[in-house]
Image (spheres, helix red, strand yellow):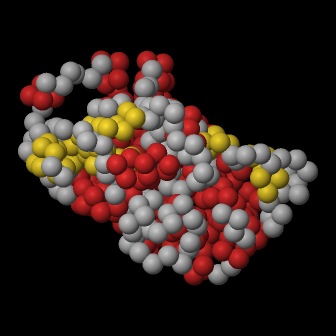
Amino acid sequence: MDSAAALPALLRIDAAARRVRLDPRDPAFVQNPYRAYAAIRAACPFFFWEDYGHWCATTHAAVGALFRDRRFGRDLKHVTTRAALGWPERPAHTKPFYDVEDRSMLENEPPVHTRLRTAVNRAFVSRAVERLRPRVAALAHALIDRVPTDAPFDLLPAFAEPIPVTVIAEMLGVPTNHAPQLLDWSHRMVAMYQFGRTRAVEDAAVAATEAFGAYVADALAQRRRQPGDDILSLLLAAGQDGARLSEDEIVSNAILLLNAGHEATVHAIGNGVAALWASKTDPAEALATPERATATVEELLRLAPPLHMFTRHALEPIEHDGVSFRIGDAVGLLIGAANHDPAVYPAPARFLPDRVGPPHVGFGGGIHFCIGAPLARLELQVALPILFARLPRLRLAEAPRFADRYHFHGLEALRVTAA
């Protein structure tokens, strides 16, 4: 969070060519990417990131526009093939992972995306999510009842992880006591998005995918015998009501919801708590009323977002900012950079919950705008005020460090003391 942190030693910017060399695993970048974003944005706001091999956008305007531009998308199979693009086939050993991923709503464009998203949207509209407020509050209180008061502890597993994973498990209709296993599978699967992943990471992700898929399929079989008031039952009913969801599509999207329903929120809580302390703000004051809590949560999601890059692919030949894209060319939308764009957020490194400006892009945009945004917001708006009201003497026990897993930006641990 330190705005005075050093720039990555190996950052190389060629402003004339609009090319950047920057290892996303550089320790200085891992701990504070915002200094590098600022330097790059000042020199070439739309740039070619050589380490990734694609163009990237850093400004709030460009990132927002590209999220909404339907000429870019997540899925290409409806317009071309890997062979036609000259792309190698994915390694055979990764096929089980991509088979599941490719059936999720996140990895599809209309009309498939529309059909899949419509089937689950009812569970995530604001009025449905609002009914979860008492449950989130009860979870927060129960977790705080169990934290040690005589020794430092890690706030992530003690508080930040159990809330979102329990809530999404209950929404889907799977036992909450299985949360540790769900977390393990999820962590191994999302490791596939890391820069420079290894064969060991791929094998672990595939094993987790296969185990997770079998688990969800078994849960679906139980719901067929005994439907409930949960998302799995909703998906089964949607398939019967003409939405034509296959068993494989239900499994893939249930896994997506379980993974997405907690991974980012865990780190939004951890990053938010650390950012509040770094800002020298009194958390109790910042969260004193529902209105202040809402404003504080939005500013924390802007200031310390847990996701920093989403990619899109050109679905047709297109020119953007003087760059010609062919079908299949990727563009990186740098959420962390856009959320710190001084053109729309003056003094972007400062925590200013009363800011006047456009909404942040922490939840993406366009048709792939995060379906769980209302739930994530509610969890933070409820959990953070309870945390600081119940533990007014909560303090850092050691300096927080971010984990090496760009484009996720979350802490390795958040060691605190409540005494």
**Where's residue 160, x and y in %?**
64, 53
Residue drawn at x 83%, y 47% is 152
Number of labels in the image equals 0
**Left or right of 325 on screen, residue 199:** right
**Where's residue 82, x and y in %?**
16, 28
Q: Check the image and report above or below for 219 versus 395.
A: above
Q: Quadrant of residue 205?
A: top left
User: Of 49 and 152, which appears nearest the observer?
Assistant: 49
**Where's residue 220, x and y in %?**
41, 45
**Left or right of 354 on screen, residue 77:** left
**Left or right of 75 on screen, residue 97:** right
Residue drawn at x 41%, y 38% is 217
Name the quarter where the C terminus is drawn.
bottom right
**Where's residue 4, x and y in %?**
60, 51
Residue drawn at x 58%, y 67% is 351
**Left or right of 388 on screen, residue 298:** left
